Image (spheres, rainbow, N blue to C red):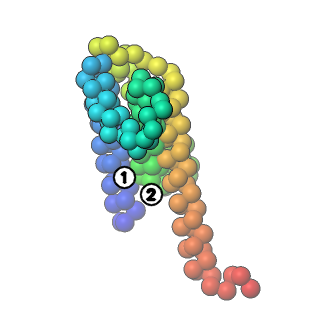
Amino acid sequence: MARKIRALVFALLALAIVCFIFSNSAQGAEESNEASGWVAAFLRPILDPLGRLDDAVFHKLVRKLAHFVEFGALGVCLCACFVNTPLRRPWISALAGSVLVACCDETIQRFTGGRSCQWQDVCIDSAGAVCGILFVCLIVLILRYYRERKSCPNSDL
């Protein structure tokens, strides 16, 4: 029962992340630039305290980093959801779902005023998802290792 609840929680989190991603994609170019400009201004003192990067370069870097982080979170949630199901290779399903969302995300931007559809963003999104999926796989391996050691206390003899 606990596995089903965990799967449901992570599925709902993944759905919320997809809604967030798609709502950002549905914004027009001006609205999107304004939102990412606010985030860039907030992050500037943290990531570039000496102001060495040009404003346009830093803004673009923040936008690409946002893609990576959003899809990293999506990869974590999808993989954690599928790990709690009987699927034999949950990371494949999580990656396929993440890439599908990335393609839909860029397609939405194509039809939004002043935005473009870029395959580079799909690659950045997919890389973020892969990192999130690898993170979950690492956690699962560590937990399995410690559970096995706990069940066999004299295994090192």
Tell me the residue that label 1 is attached to: 10
Q: Is residue 80 above or below residue 53?
A: below
Q: Residue at x 29, y 33 (%)?
A: 38
Q: In this view, does 122 lie above or below 81?
A: above
Q: Residue at x 53, y 60 (%)?
A: 139
Q: Is residue 113 above or below residue 120?
A: above
Residue 39 seen in the current view? yes
Which kind of residue does numbered mark 1 sit on? Phe
Depth order, front residue of 35/88: 35
The answer to which of marks 2 and 1 sits earlier in the sequence is: 1
Left or right of 51 on screen, residue 142: right
Residue 61 seen in the current view? no
Left or right of 22 on screen, residue 131: right
Point out the image quarter for the N terminus.
bottom left
Q: Which residue is drawn at 42% across and 18% down?
A: 117
Q: Distance between the residues labelled 2 and 1?
A: 9 Å
Residue 26 drawn at (x, y percent): 28, 24
Residue farthest to the front, as pictured: 50
Crowd around label 2: few <14 · some 14–19 · many ≥20 (10 Å): some
Which kind of residue does numbered mark 2 sit on? Asn
Q: Is mark 2 on a helix, strand or loop?
A: loop
Residue 77 drawn at (x, y percent): 41, 49
Q: In which quarter of the image is residue 8?
A: bottom left
Query: How many marks can you see?
Result: 2
Q: CB under 8 Å between callouts 2 and 1? A: yes
Q: Quadrant of residue 97?
A: top left
